[in-house]
Image (tube, helix red, strand yellow):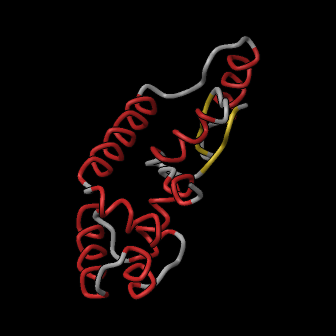
Amino acid sequence: MLALGTHDDAGEMLSRLLEAGAAGYLRKQTPAVAILEAVRRVARGETAFSQEQPAQVRCQREEARRRRASLTEREQEVLVLLAQGKSNREIAQALHITPKTAEHHVASILGKLDVANRTAAAVWALSQGFAAQAKK
């Protein structure tokens, strides 16, 4: 599979494409001659990634590992519940803590993940497999 897209900084997307078995990614603005050559390379069983793209994937994966490792066990538990859409009060009830403590954990998570809000934290959590933890 050869994917076409519009993203310049496509680290996360490239990672998902690789997991799905893609053999290359090109921007839609790529000249037709280069697209044709990429199609031929993929047809020969080769890949059609730029030199920068594998490095982008490695950087994105390393950053995700670093962020995940920065979370305490309790923050990971809170993040699982946050990814399920739970409020601070519901998180507190589930973990037998006060709502204020749940709020503190959420604030710490937002800072460690470098995201602006709960929704962004939930999206990150789901993209990193925290949804699988939630089903356990």
Vertical relation: 58 (above or below) 71: above
Front residue of this view, candidates 35 and 52? 52
Q: In the image, residue 29 lies at what x, y percent?
A: 60, 46
Q: In the image, residue 108 lies at what x, y percent?
A: 23, 70
Please tell me which residue is depicted at 41% across the width and 67% down the height of the picture: 121
Q: Image quadrant of residue 24?
A: top right
**Given the current orientation, which residue lies at the most extreme front position?**
96
Quadrant in which the C terminus is drawn: bottom right
Vertical relation: 81 (above or below) 18: below
Q: Image quadrant of residue 48?
A: top right
Horizontal relation, residue 74 to residue 77: left or right: left
Vertical relation: 87 (above or below) 48: below
Front residue of this view, candidates 67 and 71? 71
Front residue of this view, candidates 103 and 44? 103
Q: In the image, residue 53 lies at what x, y percent?
A: 45, 33
Please tell me which residue is depicted at 27% across the width and 56% down the height of the picture: 71
Q: In the image, residue 110 lies at what x, y percent?
A: 29, 70
Please tell me which residue is depicted at 36% across the width and 47% down the height of the picture: 64
